[in-house]
Image (tube, grey):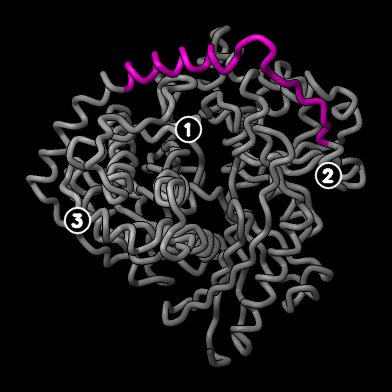
Amino acid sequence: MGPERRVILGVDVGATAVRVAAFAVDGTARHVRTRAYPLLQPLPGWHVQDPDVLVAATLAAVSACVADTAGAEVVALAISSPRYGVIGLDATLSPVTPLLTGRDTRSAEVARDLRVSGQSRELHRVTGTPVHPGSPLCKLIWFARHEPYLCTSTRWWVGLKDYLVHRLTGTLVTELSSASGTGMFDVHRRVWSAGVLDLVGVAGSQLPPVLPTTGVLRLSSAAGQAVGLPSGTPVVVGAGDGPSSSLGMAAIDSTVAGLTLAATGALRTVVAAPLVDPAEIFSCAALTEDAWVVGATANNGGNVVRWAGGALEPDPRPASDDQLVAPELLALAERVAPGSDGLVMLPYLLADRASAVDPGPPGAYLGLRSEHSRGHLVRAAVEAVCLHLGGVRDRLTELTPVSSVRLAGGAFRSPLWRAVMAAVLDCPTQVAGEDDDAALGAAALGLFAIGLAADLTEAVTLLSPASARAEPVAVDPALAATYRCLRAKLPALRTVVGRAGEILDEVAAGPGVGWRATTSSRDVVGG
């Protein structure tokens, strides 16, 4: 990359790794660096990370990407991260808790209480965020119930990106996208909700000021030295990973939904103003002041197929994170007839945020016979995940019209995944051009924020011309008919399995069974 080039860095801090992509402003080059970090599970339902480990990994990935682009001018860094994490900081801005990630479900009882009491509907109406264990609102109520001493010593409650931006710039702020995912922010008035904060027991002064997602800060001298960039380099605070992904997929037309599939799945579309789902399934989060992303995350995504591929026998060879399951297993599944010869899977291995039922039915294979092979088990899992995501699309179209879908994620490199997903959706379907959609979305938002693009669409096209040339996926009419028939039968199957699950829960919770968590979050972070 020659000295005449200008690049922008998109920093996507994911669930288990950070991905930093350097995009040439003219779209002619791209460099990507990643660094992994662990997701810790010290107790059942607890999913936490050390915030400083994530910061160190981010700095290392940025530094490596900067070295790859030696001689180029880095015009800005722009950041994307998950929206549901929570970190407690003391008065010196040091963590007193680990990062409680969006996967952390210790507050499930809090979420149930809010739904049973009827408070969840009004909370969702005000904040645009459904009440679920992953939301910061439920996590903070859990802290107030179980660790009140910790709450009294916590000066700030922040998200992951807030902490990272502070470490990069020396300024503690949040932004509209992350704030709108906390469950405590009034998305209509664009302020922290005093009524919700009273319920949670948090003062407004404990939450950071809210900037636009296009807000620009400056890289500190210490951070600049760590990554090899001049102090003062613009740092665009950016949006959450979901809105960033929609932008990176160029799925920002209100009639287009972006569907991403990795370990989890997500379906989102963009509307002009906050739109609240009366069914309390879909969240609403800002991309910019006048672009809001409505969508839901399905916890049961590619991880279900990975489980199916490995639970009964080790894979022929390990699958990459993008592949989810070894290609040999997908090849076996491709040889199985659509509908898996009567084998049906319900993919609910995890409680699912995209489900209208709480906690929802358990996962199950139904119709299992001796003639069913491992290929059947894998194909049924692929079909189950696609059918589940198709149901999410159906519910989304009840909220706002969606006429086409763009697919993204390493899973859709597989012809099987593409064919099944397109047939289930049975509408115009395309595969987006880039896999690092959240990093691209962050960079595109950054390019717009610093004035090098007139609008978001131009920003994506400048950085990645391939994003405008998505590959159409043909819908097989016979395959679509098969899945329409299967989908019609799924509600009855879910009901039956749900009843069976209730009986099994009673068995599992028999006399003398149970445990009570006593470990403190402070113990986990080492405070």
Q: Is residue 495 magenta?
A: yes
Label pair 1/2, CB-CB below 8 angstroms:
no
Which residue in the structure is indicated by mark 1? 283
Q: Residues within 10 Å of mark 3 (few under 14, many from 20)?
A: few
N-term-proximal mark, 1 vs 3: 1
Which residue in the structure is indicated by mark 3? 335
**Number of the front mark, 1 or 2:** 2
Above/below status of 228 relative to 459? below
Q: Position of residue 192 (x, y in %)?
A: 67, 29
- Please tell me in which quadrant of the rendered image residue 509 appears: top right
Q: Is residue 204 magenta?
A: no
Q: Secondary structure at mark 3?
A: loop
Mark-to-mark CA distance, 3 and 2? 48 Å
Label pair 3/2, CB-CB below 8 angstroms:
no
Which residue in the structure is indicated by mark 2? 525
Three-letter amino acid code at the position of disc 2? Val
Left or right, residue 237 beside residue 438: right
Three-letter amino acid code at the position of disc 1? Ser
**Number of the front mark, 1 or 3:** 3
The label number, if any, that marks residue 4 in the structure image: none
Residue 280 makes an appearance in the image: yes
Q: Which residues are magenta?
A: 494-521
Q: Secondary structure at mark 2?
A: helix
Above/below status of 231 relative to 189? below
N-term-proximal mark, 1 vs 2: 1
Three-letter amino acid code at the position of disc 3? Arg
Q: Position of residue 394 (x, y in %)?
A: 27, 32
